[in-house]
Amino acid sequence: MSGSTLLQLALLIPPLALAGIQLTGRWENLREAVSLVAATGLFAVVVSLYQPVLDGGAIASHWLELLPGLAIAFRIEPLGLLFALVASFLWIVTTLYAIGYMRGHGERNQTRFFSLFALSIGAVMGIAFAENLFTLFVFYEILTLCTYPLVTHAGTDKARRGGRVYLGVLLGTSVGFFLLAIIGTWLLAGTLDFKSGGIFAPGTDPALLSLLLVLFVFGVGKAAIMPFHRWLPAAMVAPTPVSALLHAVAVVKAGVFVVLKVCLLIFGLDMLKTIPATGWLLYLAGASILFASIVALRQQNLKKRLAYSTVSQLGYITLGALLATGAGMTGSALHIVMHAFGKITLFFCAGAILVAAHKTEIWELRGIGRQMPITMGAFLVASLCIIGIPPTGGTWSKWYLMLGTFEAQQWLLMGLLMVSSLLSIAYLLPIPLRAFLGGERPLEDGAGEAVAIGEAPLPSVIALSITAAGCVYLLLFPDTFYRLIAAGI
């Protein structure tokens, strides 16, 4: 099968899955089987593209040309393939988790949930393989629109309020800043195609480049750089599988991937170093890392603490890209992978606790490790991955980010990364430690009677075990992703 055909399949499998899920919606076992088969098929297709891309093969597909030089077109490059590999694999695991969660928690509108999830993954494939900024923008907006009903899935007033913040911030930043940046790029460079080394001619006015860079960084609201981060905590009203989609599989990873791609293939690392705005945007990313960590430390709701942790960790990726060094870019791209596995595991664990114990507050979890040892063991492993210490893959991304600050001689930012890692220890590690080592706290039902609990439904436990194992696997075998990053940079 040719590379172009495989690319077409990667783009078409999610919408075909959407149709299949709708047709089988009344038979839940069949519906969920369609989701799993589609997710597995997509991952197999993306994996089959790995070696051809490393070998330098040009794999492209042009769908529609609206104006000369303005087309819906796709081309596979190494960093896009890396993003697609992570998203397609985690679609499988998240679908498995959602089967246990949605049934165990008695969620309504499950067919709609699985349908929109498939559509979201389709938008991610479009973002990952976009050949130009126009195509990327179209699928970026599709992703926002098809995840909005997932955020408001519960249908409550609180869910609708969270959905309004989600939609308002993401559409406001993309239309108010991102679209302007794309138009300005077209006028200044005469093209929107991604190109190794950047598309702007030498001698381009640094002031104009600074303006465009600021518009891009603020316009990609999904990257959640402060002050455009409010949508992320607000979206925590969604079911846990949706939180996993937002934080690990699709939305925030799409945001930081776009920042990475713009820095590398629109500006180019050499030009990025000369742009005046790069310096203060670096410190803005650093401030986002630090302040979000402090806010996370103060949260007692488990999902909110994890949400602010995500804001902080996304700052790492943006900072690595803006360092404009090989090590910084490598650390940034690696952190997309490492954070995806770590954070999805943490949200899986939070959802498992909700389903099995009906607990959402951190203070309620003392002693729960004795009753849910697999879940809290996975939480501990994922916490280590987010912090960036062995035996997890987060060690590699944090190491390269530190090395990037060293190469750029950004000593203040190096110190800030160290402080942020200490804060990560402070807001993550006490949760599993108290769960295992704290005095046992009997869990009670609504009438105050003690109840015995166990692990969440088996599909959810299997899913969180797989992703926790992935955190460890990435320490031992990071080469799969490192080779793509090296080829992309």
Image: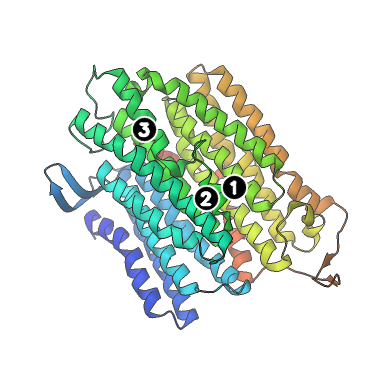
Residue tagged 3: 215
Q: Is residue 150 above or below residue 382?
A: below
Q: Residue at x 48, y 43 (%)?
A: 336
C-alpha separation, residue under disc 1 versus residue under disc 3: 24 Å
Marks 2 and 1 in Cβ contact (< 8 Å): yes
Disc 1 secondary structure class:
helix
- Compared across the picture, whether 426 is left or right of 208 comes to right
| Quadrant of image for the C terminus | top left
| Kind of residue indicated by mark 3 | Leu
- For the residue pair 448 and 334, the one nearer the viewer reads as 448
Identify the residue at image location x=34%, y=39%: 178
Q: Mark 2: few, some, or many residues within 10 Å (few <14, many ≥20)?
A: many
For marks 2 and 1, give the CA distance. Answer: 8 Å
Relative horizontal placement of residue 293, taking residue 67 as reference (left or right): right
Q: Is residue 406 above or below residue 11?
A: above
Q: Is residue 127 above or below residue 456?
A: above
Residue 70: give x, y in percent of width and height.
17, 44
Q: Which amino acid type corresponds to the residue marked 2 in the rendered image?
A: His
**Which mark identifies residue 147?**
none
